[in-house]
Amino acid sequence: MIKSLSTEDTLENAGLTAVEDFANWARANSLWILAFGTGCGAIELRPLMTARFDANRFGVAGRPTPRQSSVFVIGGYASVKTLKRIIRSYEQMQGPKFVIALGICPVNGGMYFDSYNTINQFDLYIPVDLYITGCMPRPEVLVAGIVELQKKIKQGRCDGANRYIENFDWYKANQKKVIKNWDMPDYNW
Amino acid sequence: MKHSTGHSASLDFAQPEPLDLSSGKYVKLWQGPQHPGITGNMSLELTLCGDEIVECKTHVGYLHRAFEKLMERRTYIQNFTVVCRIAVPEPTFNEYLYAQAIEELSGIEVPERAVWLRTLNLELMRLASFLMWIGGLSGAFGQYTVPNWTLAHRDYVLDLFEEMTGARIYHMYIVPGGVRAGLPDGFEQRAREIMDSTEKLLVQIERVMFNNTVFKTRSKGLGIITPDMVDPYGIVGPNARACGFARDLRKDEPYLAYDQLDFDVVTDNDSDAYSRAYCRLQETRQSISLIRQCLDRAPTDGPFQADMPNVLHWKVPAGETYVKAECTRGEYGYYIVSDGSEYIRRVHVRGPSYTHAIAVMERLAVGTNIADIAGLMVSLHTYPPEIER
Amino acid sequence: MLERLQREFGVTDINELKPGLTSLKVASDKTETLIRELRDREGYTHLNFMTVIDYIEDGIFTIVYMLHNYDNKDTLSIHVDIGRDGEDMVSIHHLWAQAWTYQRELREAYGIRFPGSPRLDEDFVLEGWDQIPPMRREFDTKKFSEERFGHREGRSSEEPREHMKVKLYPNRGGDEQ
């Protein structure tokens, strides 16, 4: 969708904006989800792919490897052990990448707020682009969330991956605070 | 009916000799948490020699939420919302067992209508869980027709749950004292229609999957459990029944309305992946017949919850009890200790996957092909959340 | 059978909790022989589970073994008291092939050691754990969670009475019931 040009835009800017719009449209319509059932939320991801709710019509497909996927769906709570693997998989995904967090547990810990093994605020460790509430969110809500994410991408507001790179030290400090057996590489882009 | 009357001296419980990993013969591979061929969020650390697995270590703990510690900090009625999340794909058995244990300790008698509704709920859950599992087994062997059918069909059963309880996955329907509500109007009609269509689907599955040469060749002889392994490893459920042991808690120690219902215990002679899957298929047919019987015989009027004390300040008398139920995977048990205060003292959840996924899996994986390991894992029907709670 | 166990193994506190479930208590040095006798001669071949109850007020851990007999459908709950501070317990990994997993979990959760049990020091569910064993009752899990993981401030909640006073009856003064 090419925006209408105002008189102040130069031709160069118009070209870049058009390319960016086209790129955003392409990204939004080909969201490939990483197949990693991190928690409870994974149970409603399977019905999402069946014919009744049919996420495929939005361009959503499940991929087995992070190198080929662009959306990471965090299904609910994240224990410390899983968080390390989430970070590893997230860093292996190539940008542009987006994160959807399901349920109330990534927001403030949910019903495991006093558990010694689950983290309370997920976006201290990985930037989140969209939160979908529910316990578990129904597939219809997941579809609505995908549509919302697509809208956000087309408007160019989903820059979680950029935030991660810009505030890399802050994220890494938070991650190292909870993950005690750190053996992952420290990137320095 | 076969029994293992003693423990065979020939069964070797010792841990295998450690391998010489620097010899260049072995490759270590993680069938890790981010993997499409694993049942849930756990990982297998495999050591391969060529194509064959020589050692397997199961790593769990990715879903550890410390339920047993959390439940000690909450009162009895607060625990009821937490308890169904312990076994994520099959939550209702947790609710039932927790309610049953508390009722035993406090001496609360559940009315008859609630007993029948609980049985109906549990059998529907068994059906939904089986449909997801058979899809998982077929997908683990790379044949994706059956998962698409069964996951879509399972949605009809989840619709029934939504009508009955208000939610698709975490129902929180079975409360201490009874159930939360009666059946809505027209439920029986819709449930019978869905049972008819599920039966037709099971016939199709049998034709497509169990008569398929590829599935048969790959799964026959995979992960054989011998009868002398059953008691030392504590193997329960269809894994043991496929070995010839006719042990089913619904028949041996009947609970709820099972002593008034009519069904058979399905056994088979040799427990490999194929016969375990076939046992479960037959059990699902039994389950459909049980659901129909429940719909026929459940009383339609009467109270569905007993008179309860004030649950906000509920002090259950001190004591301990162990209740168990036969879930899709085997014997599921809750051990509850209370000390007369408002907070529960100790809860231990005994999930059948605790032994199936760790001790049994590590033993059965030795000697299998790397391509079949996912099928072996799924055929033991393990759900990681109940291992580490 | 229970009288014989009382005589030979010094079993005490025999209590029938419900038909089919009996609990009894035995000293820690006689536990392994009692369990072996039950398994081999009396037919209690199924180990349901092994767990621990922490009685911090009495300074003991109570280890509970639950054994089941498939022939007469009877379950025994065997309680063994050991001290809370580093006392070891006899291992039963040679009696059941599944027991080492339970013992590994109890070592991690409570700090009880079972000498001879295979792979006892491997991490079971926790990774990089640097505190005391978490299931012990002196471990405050809420405090730990708030310190380590932080706490997100929620929105301010509307208390109904205050809300009504401000929104619906702004002109009335004082605290009227």
Image (spheres, coloured by chain):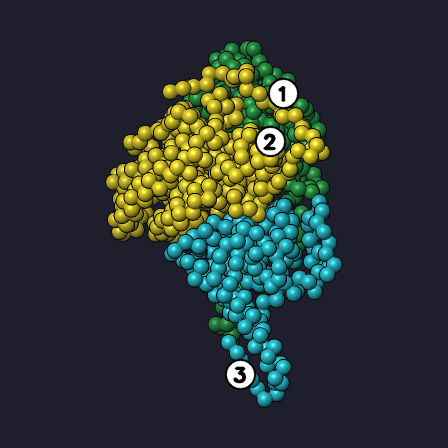
Residue C86 appears anywhere in the view: yes
- Quote the CA–CA distance across marks 2 and 3: 65 Å
Most foreground residue, A147 or C146: A147
Q: Residue B184: where, in percent of width, then height? A: 30, 51
Colour assignment, chain C: green
- Chain B's colour? yellow
Q: Position of residue C136 (x, y in %)?
A: 64, 36
Q: What is the x, y in percent for residue A107?
A: 58, 57
Secondary-structure class at tag 1: loop
Of the residues tagged 1 and 3, which is closer to the observer? 3
* Type of the residue with mark 3: Ser
Residue type pointed to by label 2: Val
Which is more foreground, mark 2 or mark 3?
Answer: 2
Q: Do the residues indicated by labels 2 and 1 lie within the same chain of the protein?
A: no
Q: Residue at x 35, y 50 (%)?
A: B156
Residue under disc 2 on the same chain as residue under disc 3: no
Q: Colour of chain A?
A: cyan
Mark 1 vs mark 3: tell me if same chain: no
Q: State the residue position of label 3.
A: A4
Q: Which residue is mark 2?
A: B54
Q: Residues within 10 Å of mark 3 (few under 14, many from 20)?
A: few
Image mark 2: chain = B
Sort mark 1 into few (<14), some (14-19) or many (20+) by Cα contacts within 10 Å.
Answer: some
Q: Which mark is residue C28?
A: 1
